[in-house]
Image (cartoon, rainbow, N blue to C red):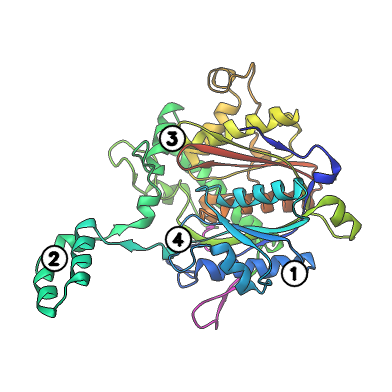
Amino acid sequence: MKAWVAKEQNNRVAVVAGTRTPFAKSGTKLKDCSAVHLGVTVAQEAMALAGLAMDGVDEVVFGNAGTPADAANISRVIALRAGLPQSTPAYSVHRNCASAMEAVAQGCLKIGAGLAESMLVGGTESMSNMPLLFTDELKDIVAAMMGAKSPLAKAQIATKIRPEMLKPVIAIMEGLTDPISGLNMGQTAEILARDFGISRETQDRFALRSHQKAAAADKGGRFKEERTPVMLEPDYKEHLANDIGPRENQSMEALAKLRPIFDRENGTITPGNACPITDGAGALVLMNESKAKAEGRAILGTITAFAFTGCEPKRMGMGPIYSTSKVLEATGWDLKDIDLVELNEAFAAQVLANQMAFSSKKYCQEKLGRDREIGELKDEVLNVNGGAIALGHPVGTTGVRLILTCLKEMQIKQKARGLATLCIGGGQGAAFLLERN
């Protein structure tokens, strides 16, 4: 698959507004909020920030990884509950960790092809509300009971139920396990830690810096630039305005006390140097750049190019280097010309492995077929406000958060070029190049 590049003025895609909810660790403040409610919150706010009436976009696309049973096409449900007219079409996309980036990509493709002039795109995820599932044995018994013709027959079938059958299948754990490699995401991060010789202490130090940067950014009001409060279901009497995750008082001593969770004997990945399971949503309003300028709208930035790539499933964390290489090659950009980079912190080991690989001529030659390294992914331009280790990673949402965070920081610091990239469960990568004129 080729990279998408906006080569002409008439198909350049402008981001005219964007917002996200606060992110909260699953089981905390947002645990009773549905993915639909979170999506509606950001959809309404993004439209308001863009200064658009509810009929002001041509289509709506939202990403979501844990599709709720009562909202199969969650994008359509969000659109209608947000107040968009019934005549506005909507569809949902799922690309694991890049679900929201896929929504943005769909917007770029539609606008770039002249099929739309404006799009509402985003992602939403309530990982707190991912279900517990019956075991196959119990499902068979329940199905048989439902088909029984008498109460006595139902009761006789029910006697076959054993206590061990009542142990649920945890949907979120199933979803975070790759069926091809047979590994969960944390186990793939352990492979990268071993491949690149990344120590537990190095990972913990990276995690500490993520918390420190995120806490400082929050304290300085930086995240107010991109967040909108969310009213809490079910009674709407409270609201959440701040992220639940960043720890100002995090320390190496506290991180060192945490035990490895994916390889208990020899592992280095702990709850402290991995992203937490998280709830949250985000949305962007995209417009044809010429239209946005003609209407005098403020523009956060433009999406210059994007690329999706595949890579080895058991080393899925290396997705960013594959997708970044492809999108840089397609545009002729050089890494040293990029002012800010947002690379999702699924695991400290995964980010550190990418940093090492970006600078490795050998890795880039052997894995990417390049004649030289991509370049140094410098600490001073990477995740300058912290990342998912502190903020969290609501799987279907993070891609929009990375783009929004990067564009807001580019605006604040008056920077011209940005990169938003992430790894994708199952062995893929996504990368978006962003510009401000």
- Rounded to the nearest angstrom, the CA distance separating label 4 from label 1 is 30 Å
Which comes sooner in the sequence, label 4 or label 1?
1
- Return the mark for residue 161: 2
| Mark 3 lies on residue | 313
Work out whether residue 69 can be spotted: yes
Residue 43 position (above or below residue 286): below
- Return the mark for residue 127: 4
Q: Is residue 234 magenta?
A: yes
Q: Residue at x 73, y 53 (%)?
A: 408
Which comes sooner in the sequence, label 1 or label 2?
1
Element under disc 4:
helix
Image quadrant in which you'd find residue 356: top right
Pointer 4: residues within 10 angstroms few (<14), some, or many (20+)? many
- Rounded to the nearest angstrom, the CA distance separating label 1 from label 2 is 53 Å
Element under disc 2:
loop
- Return the mark for residue 55: 1
- Rounded to the nearest angstrom, the CA distance separating label 4 from label 2 is 29 Å
Question: The residue under label 1 is which amino acid type?
Answer: Asp
Question: The residue under label 2 is which amino acid type?
Answer: Ile
Q: Residue at x 67, y 33 (%)?
A: 327
- Rounded to the nearest angstrom, the CA distance separating label 3 from label 1 is 41 Å
Pointer 3: residues within 10 angstroms few (<14), some, or many (20+)? many
Q: Is residue 234 left or right of residue 420?
A: left
Image coordinates of residue 333 in percent, x first then y, are: 75, 30
- Rounded to the nearest angstrom, the CA distance separating label 4 from label 3 is 23 Å
Is residue 119 or residue 96 the one in the foreground? 119
Q: Quadrant of the C terminus?
A: top right
